[in-house]
Amino acid sequence: MIINNKAENGGGVYIDIYYRSYSPIYDSIYPPILHYGVFTIIKGIISSNEATYNGGGIYNNGSFSMHGGEVSENKAVSGGGLYNTRIYSNDGGAIENNYAAYVGENDIVSNIS
């Protein structure tokens, strides 16, 4: 379970394909779960997390797969449950009951160009 965390982006989980070194500045910006490239949930729970900007539960700029489990009750300005910019697949997981300040962006926002 990943619960009750806060960060600027990716309140619960931040997935990024780019390497970032740790520093005191990053410690306050990124959540405790920081993955480089690939993150998979298998029947896990990501709940009650909050992002100042994007991805209350998960910010994905890499590859995120969900096999069962739940992403719920997270908060952000955009993408309350999931803010996605890269690869995302869902095989039976639920992303629901999240909140975003922007109307229509409560559960999933996908910005793939």
Image (cartoon, grey):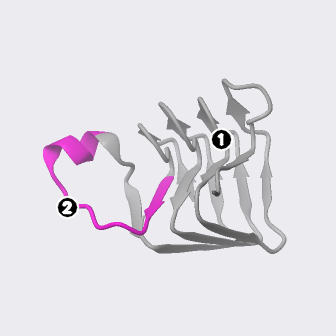
Image quarter hosting the C terminus? bottom right
33 left or right, relative to 20? right
Q: Toward which corner of the image does residue 101 lie, by quadrant? A: top right
Residue situated in front as seen by the camera: 6 or 60? 60
User: What's drawn in magenta, residue-wise?
Assistant: 13-28
Residue occupying image coordinates x 79% and y 40%: 97
65 left or right, relative to 2? right
Q: Are marks 1 and 2 in contact (CB under 8 Å)?
A: no
Instruction: Determine whether the residue tagged by mark 1 lies in a helix, strand or loop.
Output: loop
Q: Amino acid at mark 1?
A: Gly
Q: Position of residue 27 (x, y in %)?
A: 25, 46
Vertical position of residue 74 compared to residue 68: above or below: above
* Residue annotated with mark 1: 79
Instruction: Determine whether the residue tagged by mark 2 lies in a helix, strand or loop.
Output: loop
15 left or right, relative to 76? left
Q: Position of residue 23 (x, y in %)?
A: 15, 51
* Residue annotated with mark 2: 21
Residue occupying image coordinates x 49% and y 44%: 11
Q: Residues within 10 Å of mark 2 (few under 14, many from 20)?
A: few
